[in-house]
Amino acid sequence: MDHFSKDLKKLLLEAGCTFVRDGRGDHEIWYSPISMRKLIVDNKIKSRHTANAVLKDAGLPKAF
């Protein structure tokens, strides 16, 4: 099963979001200048709903 993390990170970078640091386990912390919030991004997101929820938290439209 493929995961959405690679495409999600590409969309975040295109929107101006920045990588802040590594989190616990296989998670990363990102910052969105649109929503002015920190985001937790898993490196193996298998659900499109989870990927879209991260985009929503970043202030971006659904893409998956």
Image (cartoon, rainbow, N blue to C red):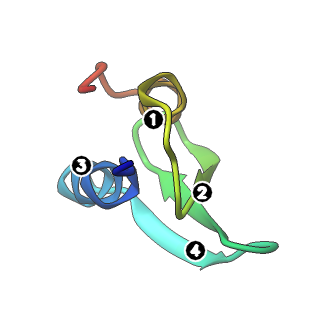
Question: The disc labelled 2 sits on which kind of residue?
Answer: Asp
Residue at image mark 3: 11
| Mark pair 3, 4: CA separation | 16 Å
The alpha-carbon separation of the residues under discs 1 and 4 comes to: 18 Å
Seen as rendered, the residue at the extreme bottom is: 22
Q: Which residue position holds label 4? A: 20
Give the image location of residue 41, x and y in percent: 57, 54
Q: CA distance from mark 3 to mark 2?
A: 15 Å
Which of the two marks, 1 or 4, is nearer to us in this view? Answer: 1
Q: Please name the residue that numbered disc 1 is placed on.
A: 51
Residue neighbourhood size for the residue with mark 3, other residues' Cα within 10 Å, grouped as few (<14), some (14–19), many (≥20):
some
Report the disc number at residue 42: 2
Mark 2 lies on a secondary structure that is: strand
Q: Secondary structure at mark 4?
A: strand
Looking at the rendered structure, the kind of residue marked 4 is Val
Where does residue 57 sit, x and y in percent of width and height? 54, 30
Mark closest to the chain's N terminus, 1 or 4: 4
Residue 61 numbered mark, or none: none
